[in-house]
Image (tube, rainbow, N blue to C red):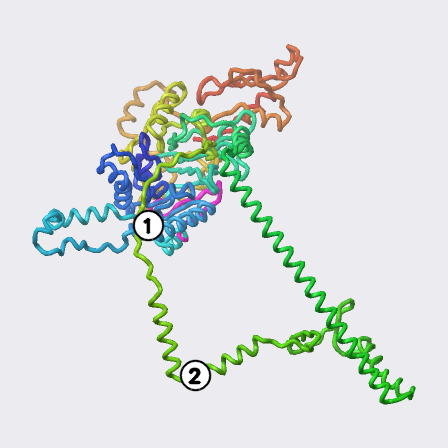
């Protein structure tokens, strides 16, 4: 038996988020998504709204959080489909405080994105306001008796009411450390990776598939030995985006069909949020957005033009001033370099003249005096033991010293006046006595008292209505299925039973009417509200049994999809050493009863009692397109002629003669699960029959 209860995000609901559903398959309880509500809802500004309605809307998460807190310790499995706050935002808090420690599964991108989204959310809320982690007692309970405390007598007389109000106002926001610990415990799977669960969930198999819409978005396929195949598919996108592929549920291209592995489930749980919405093509949406950006709002008003002209003139003045300063600085530096070079050349020539006058006309001495200059001039060409790279200047390690350039004028070296002023001020401070210092301090205090004090001020808020001169453009870039896609995908999936969730009243009714108009669509469609429980099927008791080695050796297994099936006939035996019964093969027929012997004596000689023979079973559904592909691979030509008929053999060729009909076979699908093979007995007949058997799992009796 399957039991489904929407904790939040139900059908016919005004609030579509968060998403959280409790699915019970026999004795296993599965939590599908665990989203967080909007902890900071916008307040309604209308004066017609009552205060009670405002309070209820402000704390709308109370019912959902209480229900999740009640069911969390009994949950056996958690499945997360998307990595946003609406699908997995409350999981860290429930994991840390409410006992939601059951094994959780998702894909690696969903785990990473959900962690990032939850951390950003909790940090922003905790930095902005108090979430009520440590609730304290109200000070009103400790007020003395008297007239001033009569207004609060209700709270004093009924403390439980104050506790309830405080618990309602609390926001269940986890810490950053709790977020890291919760998502670190989540098990990650790859797409199309089957996971066979153990423990209490033994027998269940979960497989994730690509859902689109978000990075790592998942469609969960749950296989149960008693309940069949369950499909949980919410917030899908069948269109391929620039950064994400579309859902695997619908194949892209001409003649889009549903993925065979996800076709015909026993139960489909899907959303109908956008069942009554038609989305434009992506090309048109992109064009609308770009056209709006290119055609901006025209500037109308002299104030804007005046402001732009003023800003432009200020920038031009600043640029001109900066350029003039740079030009003046370059001129000053060039003048200083010319002055230094002239002074150095004059001093060198004077020294040389003095040396020549002192030595007289001795030419040898003059040559000796010029030698050091030549050596100094060629010192750069001398051999050095320091390593250097070719093409680079040799640099030696020296203590960092910057020699200040002495400035000269016509009166000699220029004197730094600031240095003398600083030195004089330091000497004056050293010569001051303690009385002088105290007098200066008092004078400074008196001067500070004479300064006018800052007048008192307060913060005043006023609400002013401003007429906005702007235009709004809505472009749907959410990346979700629209009404046309939902009405196309669901009939092709063709579930045996369906549950609608995550939809407003209008969208739910629209999808129900659309499904009711399809003849082949199931009539078992449910749309439960929040907290409503839906039961599907009957409770099934499952038992464990072991197969003996002799029975396993005699089985003939046939492969079907991902499993192998076989027909078993045996006898149950119990052993004292094991609590699980064993199925053994039947070695001999049971002896006939005494009453049957008497009946046999009255029959004629040679007559035998009729016995029912076991019949073989074929599992699977034949698809003529798949049969045509297999026949083409072995060289048998086949052609579809319509109305569920496939012609195989010589008759499928164009311009075939009437004599070639003997080597032809027709395959017909008359009803669901019934296939007819018509034609003469020939090699083509046996080849086609063999391929038909190959597309099914034959369970021999």
The residue that label 2 is drawn on is: 432
Residue at image position (29%, 26%) is 596
Q: Residue at x 54, y 44 (%)?
A: 310
Q: Quadrant of residue 32?
A: top left
Q: Is residue 188 magenta?
A: yes
Is 239 on the left or on the right of 200, as rendered?
right
Disc 1, SS:
loop
User: Closer to us: mark 1 or mark 2?
Assistant: 2
Residue 318 part of the magenta segment: no
Image quadrant in which the N terminus is located: top left
Q: Is residue 84 above or below residue 318?
A: above
Crowding near the residue tagged with mark 2, few <14, some 14–19, many ≥20 C-alpha atoms within 10 Å: few
Q: Is residue 259 left or right of residue 586?
A: right
- Label 2: which secondary element: loop
- Horizontal and vertical percent for residue 361? 91, 87
Q: Position of residue 531 (x, y in %)?
A: 27, 36
Mark 1 vs mark 2, CA separation in Å: 65 Å
- Chain part drawn in magenta: 184-201
- Quadrant (top left, top right, bottom left, bottom right) of the C terminus: top left
Camera-nearest residue between 395 and 493: 395
497 or 242, which is in the foreground? Answer: 242
Residue 508 percent location from the top left of the image: 35, 27
Which residue does the numbered mark 1 point to in the structure image?
173
Crowd tier of the residue under label 1, counting other residues whose Cα lies within 10 Å: few below 14, some 14–19, many 20 or above: many
Q: Residue at x 24, y 54 (%)?
A: 135
The residue sitting at the left extreme is: 146
Label located before the other in sequence (1 or 2): 1
Q: State the residue in front, 535 or 128.
A: 128
């Amino acid at each position: 038996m399957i039991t489904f209860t929407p904790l939040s995000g139900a059908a016919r609901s005004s609030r579509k988020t968060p998403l959280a559903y409790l699915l019970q398959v026999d004795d296993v309880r599965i939590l599908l998504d665990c989203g967080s509500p909007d902890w900071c809802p916008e307040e309604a500004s209308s004066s017609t709204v009552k205060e009670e309605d405002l309070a209820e809307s402000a704390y709308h998460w109370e019912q959902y959080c209480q229900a999740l807190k009640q069911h969390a310790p009994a949950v056996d499995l958690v499945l997360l489909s998307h990595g946003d706050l609406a699908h997995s935002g409350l999981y860290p808090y429930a994991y840390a405080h409410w006992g939601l420690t059951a094994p959780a599964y998702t894909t690696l991108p969903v785990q990473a994105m959900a962690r990032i989204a939850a951390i950003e959310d909790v940090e922003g809320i905790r930095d902005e306001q108090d979430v009520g982690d440590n609730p304290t007692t109200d000070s009103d309970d400790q007020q003395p008796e008297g007239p001033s405390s009569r207004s609060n007598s209700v709270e004093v007389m009924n403390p439980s009411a104050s506790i309830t109000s405080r618990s309602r106002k609390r926001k269940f926001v986890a810490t950053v450390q709790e977020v890291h610990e919760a998502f670190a415990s989540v098990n990650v799977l790859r797409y199309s990776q089957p996971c066979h669960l153990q423990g209490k969930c033994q027998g269940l198999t979960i497989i994730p598939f690509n859902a689109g819409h978000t990075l790592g978005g998942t469609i969960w396929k749950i296989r149960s030995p008693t309940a069949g195949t369950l499909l949980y598919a919410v917030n899908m996108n069948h269109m391929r985006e620039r950064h994400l592929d579309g859902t695997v549920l619908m194949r892209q291209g001409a003649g889009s069909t549903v993925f065979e592995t996800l076709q015909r489930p026993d139960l489909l749980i899907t959303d109908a949020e956008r069942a009554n919405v038609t989305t434009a093509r992506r090309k048109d949406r992109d064009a609308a957005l770009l056209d709006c950006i290119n055609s901006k709002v025209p500037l109308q008003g002299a104030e804007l033009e005046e402001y732009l002209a003023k800003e432009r003139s200020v920038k031009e003045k600043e640029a001109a001033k900066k350029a003039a300063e740079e030009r003046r600085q370059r001129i000053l530096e060039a003048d200083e370099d010319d002055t230094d070079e002239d002074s150095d050349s004059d001093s060198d020539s004077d020294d040389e003249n003095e040396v020549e006058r002192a030595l007289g006309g001795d030419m040898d001495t003059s040559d000796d005096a010029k030698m050091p200059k030549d050596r100094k001039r060629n010192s750069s060409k001398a051999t050095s033991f320091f390593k250097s790279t070719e093409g680079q200047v040799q640099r030696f390690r020296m203590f960092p010293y910057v020699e200040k350039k002495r400035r000269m004028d016509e009166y000699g070296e220029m004197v730094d006046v600031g240095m003398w002023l600083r030195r004089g001020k330091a000497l004056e401070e050293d010569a001051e006595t303690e009385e002088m210092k105290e007098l200066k301090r008092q004078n400074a205090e008196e001067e500070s008292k004479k300064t006018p004090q800052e007048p008192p001020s307060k913060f005043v808020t006023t609400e002013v209505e401003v007429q906005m001169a702007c235009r709004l453009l809505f472009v749907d870039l959410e990346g979700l299925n629209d009404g046309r896609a939902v009405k196309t995908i669901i009939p092709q999936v063709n579930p045996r039973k369906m549950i609608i969730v995550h939809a407003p009243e209008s969208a739910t009714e629209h999808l129900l009417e659309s499904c009711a108009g399809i003849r082949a669509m199931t009539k078992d469609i449910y749309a439960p509200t929040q907290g409503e429980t839906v039961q599907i099927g009957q409770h099934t008791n499952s038992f464990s049994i072991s197969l003996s080695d002799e029975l396993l050796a005699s089985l003939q297994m046939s492969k079907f999809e991902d499993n192998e099936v076989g027909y078993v006939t045996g006898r149950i035996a119990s052993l004292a050493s094991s609590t699980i019964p064993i199925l053994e093969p039947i070695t001999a027929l049971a002896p006939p009863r005494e009453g049957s012997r008497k009946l046999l004596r009255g029959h004629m000689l040679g007559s035998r009692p009729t016995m029912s023979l076991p019949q073989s079973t074929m599992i699977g559904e034949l698809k003529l397109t798949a049969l045509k592909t297999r026949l083409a691979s072995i060289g048998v030509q086949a052609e579809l002629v319509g109305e569920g008929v496939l012609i195989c053999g010589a008759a499928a060729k164009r311009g075939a003669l009437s004599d070639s009909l003997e080597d032809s076979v027709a395959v017909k699908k008359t009803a669901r699960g019934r296939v007819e093979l018509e034609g003469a007995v020939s090699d083509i007949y046996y080849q086609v029959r063999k391929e038909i058997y190959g597309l099914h799992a034959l369970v021999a009796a």
